[in-house]
Amino acid sequence: MPRQKSERFIVPIGPQHPALKEPGHFEFTVEGEVVTNATARLGFVHRGMEKGAESRTWTQDLYLMERVCGICSHVHSMAFVLGVEKLANVQAPPRAQAIRELVAELERIHSHILWLGVAAHEGGFDTLFMFSWRDRETVMDLLETISGNRVNYSANVLGGVKVDINERQKDELLRGMDFLEERTRHYLKVVTEDDTFLGRTRNIGVMTFEEATRLGAIGPTGRASGLLRDVRMDSPYAGYPDFPIQIVTAKAGDLEARFVVRIKELFESYRLVREIVEKIPSGDLTTKIPRRIPEGETVSRVEAPRGELFYYIKSNGTDRPERVKVRTPSLCNCASVLTTAIGHKLADMPMILAGIDPCFSCNDRMVVLNGPAGQSLWDWEKLRQYGIEYYKK
Amino acid sequence: MNVTFPPLIALLLFPGGLFLLASGLVFEYVDRKFIARYQNRIGPRWFQPLADLVKLLAKEEVIPAGTIKGLFIALPIAALAAALTAGLNVPLFGFRPVFSYPGDLIGTLYLLSLMTLCIGLAGANTENRFSIVGATRALTQLFSYEAPFLLALLGPAIALGTWNIGEINQAAGMNLWFILSQPIGFLAALIGLMGKLELPPFDAPEAETEIVAGALTEYSGRGFALFRIGRDVELVIGLTLIASFYLGGFSSPLDFLWKTAVLLLITAALQSLFARLRIDQTVGLWWRVGAILLLVQMLVIIVGSSLAPFVSRLFGG
């Protein structure tokens, strides 16, 4: 019987695998159950969005950028809007900034609870998965009441926001936060006290402070290793100067710490939402913004639920951007998976992978290097053709 | 209940054969429903396990390249046959075992283990990496729970001085229930059964987020259906054994119903309470905790039962 004779036994996870909610490819070399090497290959869901942004107007791009990520859609549009406003030298009114922050925090709540469920599921703890996703519906409903949408809220417009909150919505928000806070307290208890769960998280996937610094870990993944890095605190944007956050960190750097940091960030978000609801400044929702954005380039950073989201926007003075570059947090954290994975059991891989809260679709890029033909710039048509040819094979 | 069935009926219709298969489906439904309710879900409709089975049976069975074809087809049949055969030795639905011989407890337990062995072989037969990892884990798990499970069921057997399931069933009801006199054995038997059936939290051999469907990844259609129904049948037989040994045996079908239902309720709760154990944690749990506790209990039983005559002579004489 023909059998593959190989010294190394490689377990592939992906591109299609039950542990992955999006296509990505990880190869774990195992000896028995112990992982000795790990490699990653990304780029299965490249969608050509950066290129697509160049052929759309600034307003159309807002809707395109919102669709970069299905979970953290608001932060993408916010990073884009803040960058464009900076270029146009326009400041959105305070009420709009507060509502931006409010939606961003609600989104963080929904994203962190979603992650809690997914991570629990990866560890085979389906009860926690079901319960946390049931409670997540509360915040989804709140987002729907505010914006009319569950996923792509499109709360932002250039120069302000589209949605307002009234007294009834304020009441609902406060009630929702009370309910979620009580549930979250319970989850914090579960992930720090349940013995079988701790067996899967404590001292698993440890990333020390030094390693986290070297690998450039960001967001809750980095904060769980003690990194004091949060854009909301480092360079406050939108409503954050008026409603500041308190940074949440942990020292251990293992999976348990990542759970604890994310759950404690939830409490911080609840506090912020309450504060904004109580002290929201009154006033206009939008200011005028020119259709053609003045020439220039800018960098805009916001703190997505997964870490720092980075936008580079270049305008050539027309109604379309010349270049939009997006760098999503998952890309920065991917390297940490490959390093921390080594030496652990195969059974821990899904949880270590989920520990960074990976989001592949939003970080897939295509890079064209200068080849022998000297070709370095592809237009939209050529990129599309390349895609068609690639999948024909 | 002492009813004797004609061999052919007992084999094909009741209590073995078709009725056992049907009750396997019912048990699976109840198990899934309980877990769903514990997890605050609605859960499946009553015919869902049957619908799953019919769908799988109707589907194409893909035999992957690089496998031994005969083995690939034969393994699920052997697994189901072993489970059904084991059914003949136990007091199903509260009736006397159809087929009984001295020491049939050991025979039945080996028939029940055949299922895991078949799953392990099925995984090792294919070239799929998930299957091979799954097979390794399934067999590792077999070695970890098998001995403690056997010890757990031997407790009542040694205490009663017979290794015949039918006799144990009858005698268990007359004494103090063994769940009270041998609580460690009861827990070990119940958890061992969960390990045997690869139910959460002992589902490392088929942990979907790690190795897809484990050893059965390459199985589809009929083969997969047979493995599934085989596991359901094993659930019925396993619960029957534990209930008849530890919950005072059965004297009527009604006894059978409520006792197994209580056990299902407990296993469903255990399934939804814990996170999945890694395979090394499973092995550690059984050998570091389970086996030692059971050996201590076994020692107490043996010493106790050999001292009993002296003690009664001392005080009674």
Image (cartoon, grey):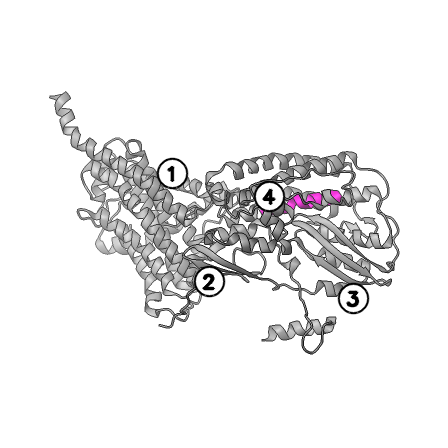
Q: Are marks 1 and 4 in contact (CB under 8 Å)?
A: no
Q: Is residue A145 visible?
A: no
Amino acid type at image mark 4: Ala
Q: Nearer the viewer, mark 3 or mark 1?
A: 3
The residue at which mark 1 appears reads as B262
- Sequence-earlier tag: 2 or 3: 2
Amino acid type at image mark 3: Ser
The residue at which mark 2 appears reads as A10
The residue at which mark 3 appears reads as A55
Please report, as a chain letter, where disc 2 is located.
A
Residue A385 falls in image quadrant: bottom right
Q: Nearer the viewer, mark 1 or mark 2?
A: 2
| Magenta-colored span | A101-115
> Image height check: is A219 above or below B294?
below
Amino acid type at image mark 1: Val
Nearest to the observer: residue B193 or residue A314: A314
